[in-house]
Amino acid sequence: MARTDTAVVGEEARAIAKHIWIAPRKVRIVLDVVRGKDVEEALTLLKFLPKRASLMVSKAIKSAAANAEQNHGMKRDSLFVAEAFADGGPTLKRHQPRQRGRAFPIKQHTTHITVVVRERR
């Protein structure tokens, strides 16, 4: 499974899920849906979103919310997704054999998902 890094900076808490085996462009579609929403509302939306990336994004949001509660003392009811973005990770390069001895390149993309939550004032 992927590794999750955590950090608390000022009045925000973040969670970074690294090396997720999905293309960043597929994750960005899901992140655009939840950016700016309250944490509970975002998790509810992700529960019913028919995308594979929604599971990975919901885990990152839950981790960021837990970091905000545990490390910074924020209240979960007032948290919202302030920033959410997906960066490309390392690409695994593979080859598939094709006709007449040729090789067909396969690029397996990975993603680093970063979620930042803040407290509403």
Image (tube, rainbow, N blue to C red):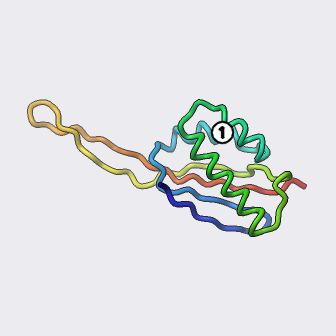
| SS under mark 1 | helix
Given residues 46 and 94, the one toward you in this image is 46
96 in relation to 19, above or below: above
The percent position of residue 66, horizontal first and vertical second, equals 72, 59
Q: Residue furthest left?
A: 100
Could you tell me residue 39's position as x and y percent? 76, 47
Question: Would you place residue 119 above or below residue 6 in this image?
Answer: above
> Which quarter shows the C terminus?
bottom right
Residue 90 quadrant: bottom left
Residue 63 percent across, percent down from the top left: 66, 57
- Toward the right, the furthest residue is 121
Q: Residues within 10 Å of mark 1 (few under 14, many from 20)?
A: few
Location of residue 119 with respect to 47 vertically, above or below: below
Q: Nearer the viewer, residue 33 or 20?
A: 20
Residue at 70 percent across and 51 percent down: it is: 83
Determine whether, in the image, residue 25 is placed left or right of residue 97. right
- Give the mark count: 1
Residue picked out by circle 1? 32
**What's the residue type where badge 1 is placed?**
Asp
Residue at the spot 63% in from the left edge and 32% down from the top edge: 49
Q: Residue at x 75, y 66 (%)?
A: 70
Q: Viewed as shown, does residue 107 lie left or right of 43?
A: left
Along the viewing direction, whichever of 57 and 31 lies nearer the viewer: 57
